[in-house]
Image (cartoon, coloured by chain):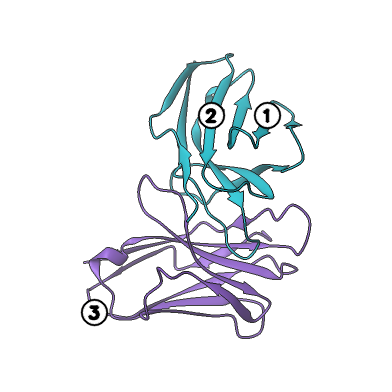
Chain colours: A purple, B cyan
Amino acid sequence: DTGVSQNPRHKITKRGQNVTFRCDPISEHNRLYWYRQTLGQGPEFLTYFQNEAQLEKSRLLSDRFSAERPKGSFSTLEIQRTEQGDSAMYLCASSPIGGSYEQYFGPGTRLTVT
Amino acid sequence: SQKIEQNSEALNIQEGKTATLTCNYTNYSPAYLQWYRQDPGRGPVFLLLIRENEKEKRKERLKVTFDTTLKQSLFHITASQPADSATYLCAPLYNFNKFYFGSGTKLNVKP
């Protein structure tokens, strides 16, 4: 399967703990996006990478969130000192440069903060 | 900031009928507008894109229209099938580095 993969698929953590999620995009895709989605809402943009450069970051993202894409391949999203409000589905998507800018989404990581 | 509105109420239709979903946006028109399908527990799947200078785009049973005067896009599924039941999201593109999604409309196609 050459689609976008995300790990873990589910994560349950206690409030105050740090969590890290991983995204492996489609190999030839330069663009990588992270989103957060809560029930009944559409995906909410968090951050964007073109290759290894983080070019866009949502103002909604607090200092507790950080993302990296060190070699322009896989990416990680870390949430420090998790809060109950961080409970959501975290989606990663990749996209090739040019074309229709269609995004290919991974299956998501569901985070539950207790 | 841009506001994207999709009907939050589910659309219930009979199999074989045409489903029409609406996406309204505020302020200036996007260069592109995309539509995605999302099934429960899964990531969205890209369906169609329409450009600002295009009035209509078709792909098999799908049709998208784009009216920049009304600031609206319509998404049609003809000869709908129960397998078309899902949530449909619109995503206007204002900035290729940053995508905004509507909250989606849930479509239920009854046999």
Residue type at mark 2: give it. Leu
How far apart are the alpha carbons under marks 2 and 1?
11 Å
Give the labeled residue for mark 1: B62
Of all residues, the one furthest to the bottom in this rendering is A70
Chain of the residue where label 3 is placed in the rendered structure: A
The residue closer to the viewer here, A4 or A79, is A79
Q: Position of residue B68 (x, y in %)?
A: 65, 37
Q: Residues within 10 Å of mark 2 (few under 14, many from 20)?
A: many
Residue visible at 56% across and 59% down?
A106
Residue B39 is left or right of residue A38, and the answer is right
Q: In the rendered structure, which amino acid carries the disc numbered 1?
A: Leu
Mark 2 highlights which residue?
A: B21
**Marks 2, 3 in one chain:** no
- Badge 3 crowding class, 10 Å Cα cut-off, few under 14, some 14 to 19, many 20 or more, is some
Q: Mark 1 Cα within 10 Å, few/some/many (few <14, many 20+)? A: some
Compared to residue B98, the image places residue B82 above or below, namely: above
Amino acid type for the residue under numbered disc 3 = Gly
The residue positioned 61% from the left and 85% from the top of the image is A70
Residue under numbered circle 3:
A16
Residues tagged by mark 3 and mark 1 found on one chain of the structure = no
Single out the mark in the foreground, 2 or 1.
Answer: 2
